[in-house]
Amino acid sequence: METKEIEKLCQRCKQSYSDSSNDASSCRFHPSFFVCRRHDDQKRYYELKPDDPPYAAKFYDCCGAEDPNAPGCVTSPHISYDD
């Protein structure tokens, strides 16, 4: 009799996975939030104020990617909601 693996849902990337396919690089995610601050000099990040100029950008706080659909900048094993 064949045992069927239980599919789990990853907390970070929201993909389904099984324990047998879960390795150190299975999950790709951003460890920080997508934020809205200006980062004009790439060294300091500022909170947006009402008078801020229109070049204020939205980006991931962890890696600076400005596309909200950018692939994650960190990999690790998946983490289940059941773990």
Image (cartoon, rainbow, N blue to C red):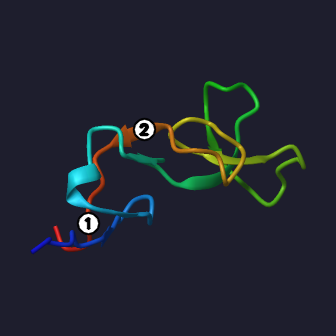
Q: For this rendering, which residue is in front, 79 or 52? A: 79
Please identify the residue farthest to the left as the structure is shown: 1
Q: Residue type at mark 1?
A: Ser
76, 1: nearer the viewer:
1
Sequence-wise first label, 2 or 1: 2
Q: What residue type is labelled 2?
A: Val
Looking at the image, which residue is at 14% across and 71% down? 2
Left or right, 83 with respect to 74, comes to left
Q: Which residue is drawn at 74% across and 56% down?
A: 49
- Residue 8 % position (x, y): 29, 70
Assess disc 2: are there few (<14), some (14-19) or many (≥20) residues with their C-alpha within 10 Å of its C-alpha.
few
Q: Is mark 1 on a helix, strand or loop?
A: loop
Where 62 falls versus 18 (above or below)? above
Q: In this view, does 50 lie above or below 70?
A: below
For disc 1, the neighbor class at 10 Å (few under 14, some 14 to 19, many from 20) is some
Which quadrant of the view contains residue 82? bottom left
Please identify the residue farthest to the right as the structure is shown: 54
Q: Where is residue 4 in the image (x, y as percent from the top left)?
A: 20, 72
Counting from the top left corner in percent of width and height, residue 76 is at 31, 42
SS state under label 2: strand
| Residue at x 29% of width, y 71% of height | 7
Q: Is label 2 or label 1 in front?
A: 1
- The Cα–Cα distance between marks 2 and 1, rounded to whole angstroms, is 17 Å
User: Residue tagged by mark 1?
Assistant: 80
Locate residue 29, reporting x and y percent: 46, 48
Q: Which of 3 and 56 is in front in this view?
A: 3
Rendering quarter of residue 61: top right
**Is residue 73 left or right of 83 when viewed as pictured?**
right
Which label number is shown at residue 74?
2
